[in-house]
Image (cartoon, rainbow, N blue to C red):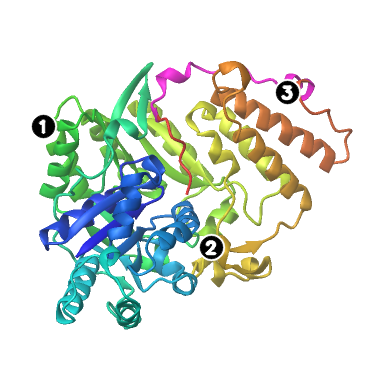
Amino acid sequence: MKVVLISTYELGRQPFGLASPAAWLREAGAEVGCLDLSRTGFSESAEAAVRAADVIAFYLPMHTATRLAIEALPRVRSLNSMAHLCFYGLYAPLNEAYLRRLGAQTILGGEFEEGLVALAGKLGARSDAAGNQPGAGDLAGKGEEKRRRDSQDEPVISPVISMARQRFRVPERSGLPDLKHYARLEIDGERRVTGYTEATRGCKHLCRHCPIVPVYEGRFRIVQREVVLADIGQQVQAGAAHITFGDPDFFNGVGHSLAIVEALHREHPGLTYDVTIKIEHLLKYAHLLKRLRETGCLFVTTAVECLDDRVLGLFGKGHTRDDFVRVVELFREVGLALSPTFIPFHPWTTVESYCEMLEALWALGLAESIAPVQLAVRLLIPARSRLLELPEIRERLSGLKEHELSYRWSYADAAVERLYASVRCIVGEERVAGGKSKPSRSEIFSRVWAETARARRKADGSQPLPKGKEAADHFALEALPARACIPYLNEPWFC
């Protein structure tokens, strides 16, 4: 049985969502190919692997990955229209109906490794029972093709979402591009090769806007400690000097996670790492922040989302604006860098509230700590989102747009839509002509601030300032410390 696992995007990381099931499938006797289209595209070898596959499985950990998978699907099907088509990962069950209309035969969410092994086993058994040789690319004859298609239409794996407590295998990364081709850590003018692993999946919190909640429903699952440490060890041997833990909240299983970083520090004392932790947990376990720093943690990503307490309550975030400010203070006391993420454009955003958010972030000295893309994130409301429970949301919706994988919604004030378009344009700029480097984060922040100030003046009836340099000069912001002293990954985060 030949299985091809495909990743289209995973935040610039070497995809755990391919490496982990590859180990399970190979152990079960399958021939596995791993394609990371974000790094290799459709090379000749990739096309050959797709043509020969019995099973083609797309990994869908997030919205962007799903959109890109859908874009890649016609080419994949043109190369091999007979392979069993599977989608797995967080966004697969959220978009089940649409993916099935696109030809998906198996959908796996939650803990997917056992499901992929079962799928390969059942298809292999059917092929053996029919006396076929594996390899869709080797089949010939219209009658044989019809028989194969008919067999594929039958149910193979019925559970869409599994919450099974799995006994993980050490991820198999040999079939993926070298770590040097992925996002790297930037610190003090140095660029470090960065690995990626997961110690837990899911989340025990129920934030309404989070796509994890409809799948895991407040549960999380651990990856066994010895597996995590072995996975990190093999990445260190491959050149990794820094590790990103991709857990939605590293402190969901705080004892499990701390034991891992303690052991990690003993085994690789020079290795650094970063984690993601909820504001609520950063306050609850404030006494552990120093231990994170001592074991090599360089920065913590935390989903702030916005600074409006009413909206934070609607999102079900479990923290307030004051809580966030306290966390900023704690991190400065401990000497850890904080990397906040935001959803600044949501149905309740006003020009004034966006301007106030920028003012607060500047006053807190965070302009250089925030990836510019975070200033332009617009709320996504996927199918089955808990936000749909809110009357305040339902009245702003104009229906589910399946090809966009999200409900469309509108602002109460059209001026916010115009501001969003302007901010998105500013933060999306690539390298300027002449080979000059990108503007710094503080420069982009200043330009966003100038554009927002213009919009606010127009909204309150004042004479708007001109665009461009005159406005930027009028709202010029003082210089911040050099970016080099703040660690960050060189591929911006977005969902």
Residue found at the very far front of the displayed protein? 141
Q: Position of residue 300 (x, y in %)?
A: 36, 37
Q: Position of residue 384 (x, y in %)?
A: 48, 70
Q: Residue at x 57, y 60 (%)?
A: 404
Q: Residue at x 30, y 77 (%)?
A: 159
Q: Is residue 11 visible?
A: no
Q: Which residue is mark 2?
A: 405
Q: Which residue is mark 3?
A: 472
The correct choice, above or below, for 495 with respect to 331 in the image is: below
Q: Residue at x 34, y 25 (%)?
A: 335
- Spatial CA distance of label 1 from label 3 is 49 Å
Identify the secondary structure beneath mark 3. Answer: helix
Dot 1 alpha-carbon crowd within 10 angstroms: few under 14, some 14 to 19, many 20 or more: few
Left or right? Give the position of 493 relative to 83.
right
Q: Position of residue 98 (x, y in %)?
A: 50, 71
Identify the secondary structure beneath mark 1. Answer: helix
In the rendered structure, does residue 479 fall within the stretch colored magenta? yes
Q: Earlier in the sequence, mark 1 or mark 2?
A: 1
The correct choice, above or below, for 171 with respect to 148 in the image is: above
Q: Which residue is mark 1?
A: 266
Residue extent of the magenta highlight: 470-488
Circle 1/circle 2 CB separation < 8 Å? no
The correct choice, above or below, for 277 with respect to 193 in the image is: below
